Image: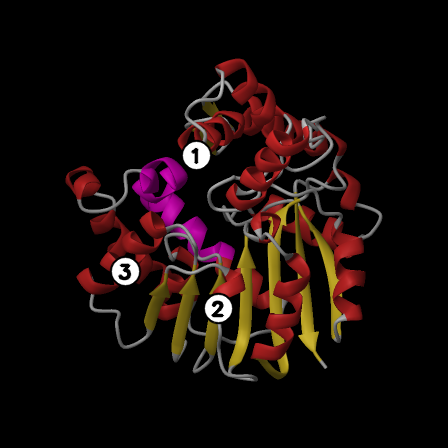
Amino acid sequence: MRAFRTVSQAVDALYAQVMRPENKGRYSEELWHYYPQLTHSRGRIQETRYVYDLCRLARFDPEGARVLDAGCGYGLQLTILHFMGIREGIGIDPYEDRLNTFRQIIQDFCLQTTLQGYPIGLEKATFEPESFDMVLSNEAISHYPDVELFFKKAYQWLRPGGVLIIADGNNGANPRLVRFTREVWRRFEQGPPGTIGAHCIERPYVEMRAEIIRQTYPDLEQSVVRQLAERTSGMTKEAILQAVAHYLRTGELPQSIFDGTQCPVNPYSGAVIERLFHPLRLAQELQRFGFRARAYAYFGGAGGNPLVRIANAVLQAMTPLSVRWAPSFRIVAYKQ
């Protein structure tokens, strides 16, 4: 791999310009909320080391590779991989605001020869079979509407021997994170608006569903609208309106009521918020799709503290025993 110092300096210089306060009108302001660490040099170097560590864990040298980032957001990891020498990096994400910022960064810093971004979800993405050396899912798999579809497509798109790298919070095995994630679910579903962790809740999903119902059936009483909105949890717009139409014909109320055990769904986009995934089971599931997969507990180290990095290496080697206490996980899966 290219020298870390050279790459980290290039990433540092680029994002020092991106994150200037006067650029909040040029790029999405959420970028500053989502990546506050990019506002200082130490954080930018940490993000570079984070990507290096992923590649080292997977024994993957990005030099000359073609990479897909499924759920790339603002394109930070792809931009770092650009400086690490990839031949081409493609990012997909259904959130246009984030993709537009990524595209603007590509344009502003003349990265078009390497990087591209497409504002599409996984279900609409199509690429040539066996056309990527690496598929990356960084803090994204818990938001995919259809995880099995992702596994199928990733296997199809990867070249033989290509690698799928998954990195996410360990919210399915770590009991503390399980409890926190369920509270995130409740807030997105029922409110109130505001922030919880790294999430920003603008409107609860129950209010979005009520809006969908009112727009189509403006004469319904508000109490009925509210009752129907509460009983269509987990549905998207089409399913909500079908359930309401069925109620109006038959008087039968829908029974999809949020009880805290199901991940809520954005009724407009179909996006899900933080599914619970146990990394060991996820690695086993990947093998069913033809991958040779292994899960790793992750305890940190991207900040560069040598003691933390040593501790992480030891505890990572102790997976699966250590996974219960890990804040995050990594899965490395090779196409056989």
In front of the other: 272 or 57? 272
User: Is 103 placed above or below 26 here?
Assistant: below
Q: At which x and y percent is residue 214?
A: 44, 27
Quarter occupied by the C terminus: bottom right
Element marked by disc 1: helix
Q: Residue at point 32% right, 48% down?
A: 97
**Who comes first in sequence, dot 1 or dot 3?**
3
Q: For this rendering, which residue is in front, 208 or 173?
A: 208
Q: Mark 1, mark 3: which one is toward the viewer?
A: 1
Residues drawn in magenta = 30-50
Q: Which amino acid does label 3 sit on?
A: Arg
Q: Which residue is label 2 attached to? A: 125
> Which amino acid does the dot numbered 1 rest on?
Thr
Q: How far apart are marks 1 and 3 (CA)?
A: 35 Å
Q: Which mark is residue 216?
A: 1
| Residue occupying image coordinates x 49% and y 65% | 124
Q: Where is residue 327 in the image (x, y as percent from the top left)?
A: 66, 40
Residue pointed to by mark 3: 103
Badge 3: residue crowd in 10 Å (few <14, some 14–19, many ≥20): many
Residue 51 or residue 243, whichever sits in front: 243
Element under disc 2: loop
Q: Which of marks 2 and 3 is in front?
A: 2
